[in-house]
Amino acid sequence: MSNSVIDRIKKTDWQLIILLLPGLIWLVMFAYIPMAGLKMAFYNYNAFAGFDGSVFVGLKNFQQLFQGQDFLRAFKNTLQIGVLQLIICFPFSIFLAILVTEMRSKFLPKITQTVTFLPYFVSTVVACGIVISFLSPSTGIINLLLNKLGHESIYFMVDPKYFKGIYVTMMLWKTAGFNAVVYIAALMGIDPSLYEAADVEGATRMQKIRKITLPCIAPTISVMLILELGRIMKVGYESILLLYQPSTYSTADVIGTYTYRLGIVQNNFGLSTAAGLFESVIALIMVIAANRISKKLSESSIW
């Protein structure tokens, strides 16, 4: 780096660099340095012997992974839950943001925003505990209502057919308000003269949403969609780990929980890392593809 660039940084940007440093240090320590451990995917890794005492097996872990029935089940469940989240949770946040900004009352938007925003700060453990309590076959409010209506109690948490619906509903409750904040910020940036011109033309509220609101926040929607596609393979496995049990593995087991069982429970670190690496590569491919498609169709992209 030339002296002139260093001098310019010292004079103008040093405050910004100081602000940036903690984030960069965190990123290097917790995102880049751990990547060195990815080579475990190519070893029959022994935690006590280290890499020097472990046997290099090449792609054998990946071959074993792809041939396993449990992995295929976990891959299928990951895609299904990820797509369900994308179809239900993603548009709901946009709908919520538009709903809040379109309300004419002064207090109702604030109440709606607070009620939908607060669940985001509830810890995953507490949120899962609430869900389990609500769905309890003996004391859960859902089953008590069913009993009052003359129906028998349903064992929601042990029946595989209910798991995906329960999980997606919980994530919708937990994240909708927080995700809507981004769209509310984008909606606040729309030029009010556009709506005034539409009022003069006699446009209805729905026509203004369709012709002004949605096109104006389309770049924000595109960027958020790209980020969501990158997370489609990384469904909240912590929540699933707390909610699922062996009887619901058929619909609840995802790559994240499968990797956890392989690595922590079975001590098969090589196979576990191979599963995690495969998950990350698929997520990276999806982000790159979505970014290119978005750039081509709407000229909005992350890079």
Image (cartoon, rainbow, N blue to C red):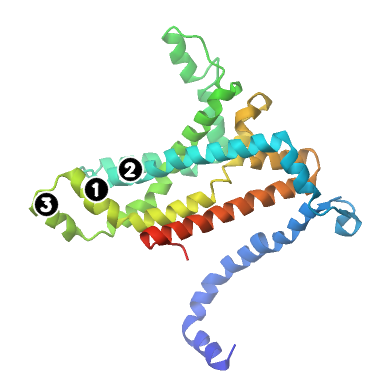
Image height check: is 91 above or below 140?
below
Query: Which residue does the numbered mark 3 point to in the structure image?
Result: 199
Q: How far across and how far down the image is residue 174, in percent?
A: 47, 39
Percent position (x, y) of residue 259?
Answer: 70, 42
Is residue 89 or residue 76 the one in the foreground? 76
Q: Residues within 10 Å of mark 1 (few under 14, many from 20)?
A: few
- Quick one: 291 or 115, which is closer to the camera? 291
Query: Would residue 134 appear left or right of 274 to someone viewing this image?
Result: left
Using the image, tell me which numbered label, if any, was put on residue 228.
Answer: none
Residue at image coords 25%, 59%: 190
Gap in angstroms between the C-alphas marked 2 and 3: 22 Å
Of tags 1 and 2, the one toward the viewer is: 1
Report the Cα–Cα distance between label 1 and label 2: 12 Å
Upstream in sequence: badge 1 or badge 3: 3
- Which secondary structure lies at badge 2? helix
Residue at (55, 35) in percent of width and height: 126
Residue denoted by label 1: 210
Instruction: Indicate the secondary structure of the residue bearing disc 1.
Output: helix
Amino acid type, mark 1: Arg
Q: Looking at the image, is 141 positioned above or below residue 204?
A: above
Q: Position of 296 compared to 152: left or right?
A: left
**Residue beneath the point at 85% across and 58% down:** 51
Q: Position of residue 171 (x, y in %)?
A: 49, 38
Q: Which amino acid, mark 2?
A: Phe
Asked if one can make out residue 20 in the rendered structure from this viewpoint, the answer is: yes
> Which residue is tagged 2?
95
Residue at horizontal 38%, vertical 39%? Answer: 115
- Is mark 2 in CB contact (under 8 Å) with mark 3? no
| Label located before the other in sequence (1 or 2) | 2
CA separation in Å, label 1 and label 3: 14 Å
